[in-house]
Amino acid sequence: MSGSRIVALGHYQPPKVLTNDDLAVLVDTDDEWIRTRVGIRTRHVAEAETLVDLATEAAQKALARSGRTADEIDLVVVATCTAVERSPNTAAAVAARLGVRAPAAYDINTVCSGFSYALATADHAIRAGAARRALVIGAERMTDTLDWTDRSTCVIFGDGAGAAVVEAQEEGAEPGIGPVVWGSEPEKGDAVVITGWNPVISQQGQSVFRWATTQLAPLARQACERAGIDPSELKGFVPHQANLRIIDAIAAKLGLADAVVARDVVDSGNTSAASIPLAFSKLVERGELSPGDPVLLFGFGGGLAYAGQVVRCP
Ligand code: UT7
């Protein structure tokens, strides 16, 4: 079974930006609280753009950068927890927009860990010979789930999308996507809820914070072990962008040596399943990571689910 690799990344954020001061007009909050507790300064908010628009824009960029064309794609996977339409699913709608012919197309919802789950399923499909080249997308309109009078959530989330073109590698080549470490603690599922029609997000912030800062570093380390790499050898660490304090706590526990740590939460807020490909794509675009660099991706959140893998930078 030959492995797969990420050939290119792309991302898209809607142009409207909300600052902390903008939010302080809506609810009883302030820039100081948001920056010190979560690390966020701004977030992007979709207006007319649909979830499919966001996903398509990001996928189009990844595809253009990959040098491949839509008719070379045979699998489209979209990680999202904010799809409104049940049919066609987001992946099929994106495929239709891009002109991808006869792809396997499905959505996956493991909330904030969705992109790492989606990437693993695409890698597995390629290894099994069920696909050759995939578009793997994380896209969210988290602001659809917000109660703009609830200061504990409306300051945290944002909208956006990131995408990767993933393709089969030569037999015997070093895998570009390492083994996934994934799982969940379903008994803690009520710590993050987005339920019902017209769902509104709520979370037990402190218990998720405790879980993230105490339970996840050993799992992230396991993903490195399974890829045969020590965390000190990583060149990049792109965790889910939930909270700067969580990112820094996990990074410190991993014992990174000279890895670039993604801190896109500062500019983009928490974009759930979009946060990892969005942050990863920006680091590559800015030249902060180079082709072949080992990068640890690690998603976590609602479920409470987690997933991570070491990938080689495109
Ligand atoms: O991506 C999905 C997974 N989710 C996560 O990873 C989230 C993990 N949790 C967190 O990131 C943090 O728990 C939060 C950022 C959600 C909250 O930060 P916190 O330091 O845990 O604050 P807290 O919920 O304990 O609230 C502390 C105080 C409370 O006031 P009292 O009861 O002490 O008077 C809140 O009412 O801060 C208050 N508060 C705010 N104050 C100003 C809550 N939200 C705000 C706000 N502005 N926006």
Image: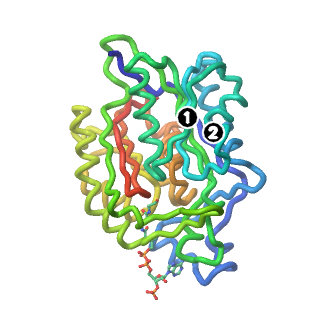
In the picture of the structure, the residue carrying the numbered disc 1 is 106
Q: Is residue 90 left or right of residue 180?
A: right
Name the element at disc 1.
Answer: strand
Image quadrant of residue 4?
Answer: top left
- Identity of the residue furthest to the bottom in this view: 28
**Residue visible at 41% across and 67% down in the picture:** 191
Q: Position of residue 168 (x, y in %)?
A: 44, 18
Give the numbered dot on residue 89: 2
**Residue visible at 54% across and 43% down in the picture:** 138
Q: Position of residue 283 (x, y in %)?
A: 49, 42
Name the element at disc 2.
Answer: loop
As drawn, 63 above or below 305: above
Q: Of the two numbered discs 2 and 1 on the same chain, state the one appearing first in sequence.
A: 2
As drawn, 42 above or below 67: below
Instruction: Give the position of the N terminus as an image quadrant.
Output: top left
**Camera-nearest residue between 228 and 234:** 228
| Label 1 beta carbon within 8 A of ligand 1 | no
Q: Residues within 10 Å of mark 1 (few under 14, many from 20)?
A: some
